Image: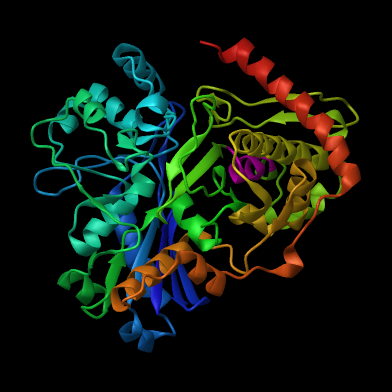
Amino acid sequence: MYIGIDCGTQGTKAILWNEGLILNSAYSPHQLVQDDSGRREQSPLWWLEAMMNAINSVFKGFEAERTSVKGIGISGQQHGLVLLDKHDKVICDALLWCDTRPEQVLKEFESHRGVSFADKIGIQVPVAFTIAKLLWIKRHKPSAFSQIHKIMLPHDYLNFCLTGRYAIEAGDASGTGWFDTNKKAIDQDILSSLNLPSTYQQPEIAASDAIFGMLRPEMCKALQLNANVIVSSGGGDNMMAAIGTGNVDEGILTMSLGTSGTVFGHTNKQVDTAQFPDLNAFCSSSNGYLPLVSTMNVTTANNQILNLMGQDISHFDLLLQQSRVGAEGLLSLPFYNGARLPNVPSAKGAMFGMTASNLSQGNLLRATVEGVTYNLARGIDVLRQSGVKFDQACVIGGGANSRAWRQIIADVTGLKLVTPVSTEAAAIGGAIQAYWAKENQMSVNRYQLTDICRDFVKFDESATVTPIQENNDKYKELSKSYNTTVDNYLNIHFAN
């Protein structure tokens, strides 16, 4: 019996997992501090409280299973900046991955230091990465910066709370901006260029397949769990979702349709990203690599249009089916929170092609969904051009529940889409990784993660969709036109 945790932007989920089956799940929402400046912050204490609440809630009706739990694995939203002082107290609210305020300070750092991140650490570094948040804190909150003793990512912080160990693992750490993805080690040159205070303490580096630590006594008591419960290294949400969808070998993409959209594969060697500024060549949390592209404004964009029309998610598929391919010429550029693909954090949304005859609710929603999908497809093209091999995609996240949207994605990309039995891939990935670490502890022979995923990750065959050739042919032209419109719009209005 294992507990998988997924600490996301909107809330924390806990699942009770036993050899491929989810016995129960629980969810605890988070607050979000935001404004039009691009500010997106949360208190790390909210994550801890939500995790504790979710774990305790997941045992409702399963109280007897508390004594059967062997391990916990944590998935966390990537890139968030958590700062602790010398007393291990949180210094200030965490800047999240989607906080776009640090755009300028990151550009200045790259320019003044002459840093080529792709050459230096093997990965492109957008404003979402942790280093941008740290540079912003240094400039705008110098008092907080001067108190830094430990720097963590969201899942690192929860691991620290559970075990007391201060350490990082390669997958999530590769999204900081100071982690060498080729050597899988902290780049001391970049770290020293940040001029951190003398009180700063570097973390250990933990292996993805080994036990990270044991539950602290106070946590055992609070959660009513045994003292022999292990905690695995955990990882970022995309790294854990890769494990939870069986994406631990080459040949498949995982596409996550959530607040943001991510598309990623698996490679055994690092991808050369020098010619691909929109590609994040992360390390995986399975001892490999996870080349990834990311877009912003995914389910949030769709939901904003639904809310504007006074509709809710129950009408989503019905409204999409009321419109045809191309939404009768209506184009939506849904950059409501900036853009990450292309990487223009200051971008604003736009709508083109409105006429008296095409401005219907169905077309308005389809144009938005198509815009979101074109952006995702653009990312898939980047992965393909960089040499990542795949012939199908596994779709997860809230948006994966819509068959109509899945069909649009298949039609736009030309890919067969499969869906796991459970779309809670990140939490499942955490549970599987904990299982992997525990089994490796108890066995002389190392367990292969590919074998574990083959045994425990199952797909819903009835949810599989394949491209409709006629629609795919139309979308090939429509997507080219859309990307040209996006590039022209961004160059005219948001070029530096």
**Residue 378 seen anywhere in this rendered image of the structure:** yes
- Spot occupied by residue 227 in the image (x, y as percentages of width and height): 20, 78
The residue positioned 13% from the left and 35% from the top of the image is: 147
The residue positioned 54% from the left and 27% from the top of the image is: 276
The residue positioned 9% from the left and 48% from the top of the image is: 87
Is 295 magenta? The answer is: no
Start-end of magenta stretch: 297-305
Q: Residue furthest bottom?
A: 64
**In the rendered image, which quarter is residue 15 located in?**
bottom left
Q: Is residue 269 left or right of residue 417?
A: left
Give the main secondary structure, helix, strand or loop, of the magenta stretch.
Answer: helix
Q: Is residue 256 left or right of residue 194?
A: right
- 324 lies above or below 166: above
- 292 lies above or below 450: above
**Residue 326 seen anywhere in this rendered image of the structure:** no
**Which quadrant holds the N terminus?**
bottom left
Q: Residue furthest front?
A: 445
